[in-house]
Amino acid sequence: RAAAAEAAAKEGKKPPAKSEKPPDPDPLGEKLLATKTPLEDALKALALLEKHASHRAETHDLAFSVYVRQNKLPLALRALKRGVAADSGDFATRRNVVFLASKTSDADPSDRLAALVVKGVSEIMESAGAGSLNAYVELMLEQARSPSDVACAAEACAAARGADDAENKKRLLAVVGAVSLDGVSAKQCASALARVRAVDAAAGEALRVKCASAFPRGEAFKA
């Protein structure tokens, strides 16, 4: 900007006016919280994200959540495929694959749309090297490295096998034991901890102890 102003001055022109950022009409988010059309508002925000941030897996994770809430499963599958294309290793996308597989596990075979969704989900799992839902979940457990990964894997386990599955509980404890906190913030740990606790208390406690060791002053990690 300084260079542009200097050049304009030399040519006897007025320097370009500074562009001012318009004021935020809802700085505290009160209008957003009071909306009576949350899904419609989410779709508007989603359209902008898909236009400007389609390369990010998070955009398609959000799309998936919106379409599942609307029970638009073919669109949810499309969001999954786009998320996988953006980042095939994204754990939130992989968890969503498990969610959709579980949701359509008892679909009516005569329902053509449901059959297409089931086929699409199976193809995603097969492309990851898993021939079944259980194998896909196992891959997630084996490859989980961060607290956020573990939280996604825990939610996938609960969706596929049920939160009370004894083998699940053992596997989650083992995965938490191996998780790395390198480069992870206290905020990220706290978010993951809340999600793991919601699935399994013992795994949540094991993660809390680990996080408390790394962040001894963190309120979220106190016993």
Image: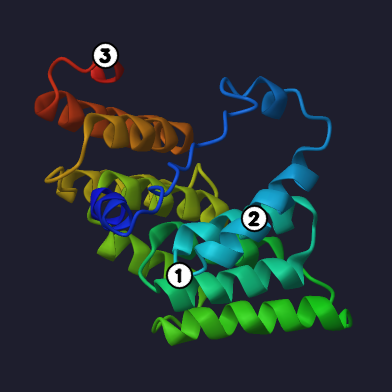
Q: Residue 144, position in %: x, y?
A: 28, 58
Say if 39 sits above or below 61 in the image.
above
**First in residue order: circle 2 vs circle 1:** 2
Q: CA distance from mark 1 to mark 3?
A: 35 Å
Label 2 is placed on what type of residue?
A: Leu
Task: Choose mark 3 or mark 2, whichever is in front.
Answer: 2
Mark 3, residue position: 219
Q: CA distance from mark 2 to mark 1?
A: 13 Å
At x 72%, y 52%, the residue is: 43
Q: Is residue 175 visible?
A: yes
* Residue 216 appears left or right of 140: left
Q: Amino acid at mark 3?
A: Glu
Q: Is residue 98 visible?
A: no
Q: Which residue is mark 1?
A: 55
Residue 113, x across and y down, in percent: 82, 79
Across and down, in percent, residue 134 comes to 47, 69
Q: Badge 3: how crowded within 10 Å, few (<14), some, or many (20+)?
A: few
Q: Position of residue 180 (x, y in %)?
A: 15, 48
Nearer mark to the viewer, of 1 and 3: 1
Of residues 36 and 100, the one nearer the viewer is 36
Q: Is residue 23 above or below residue 88?
A: above
Mark 2 lies on residue: 46
Residue for point 41% across, 30% down: 194
Identify which amino acid the numbered label 1 is placed on: His
How crowded pointer 1 is (Cα within 10 Å; few <14, some 14-19, many 20+) is rated as some
Find the distance from the CA under tag 3 to the CA under tag 2.
Answer: 34 Å
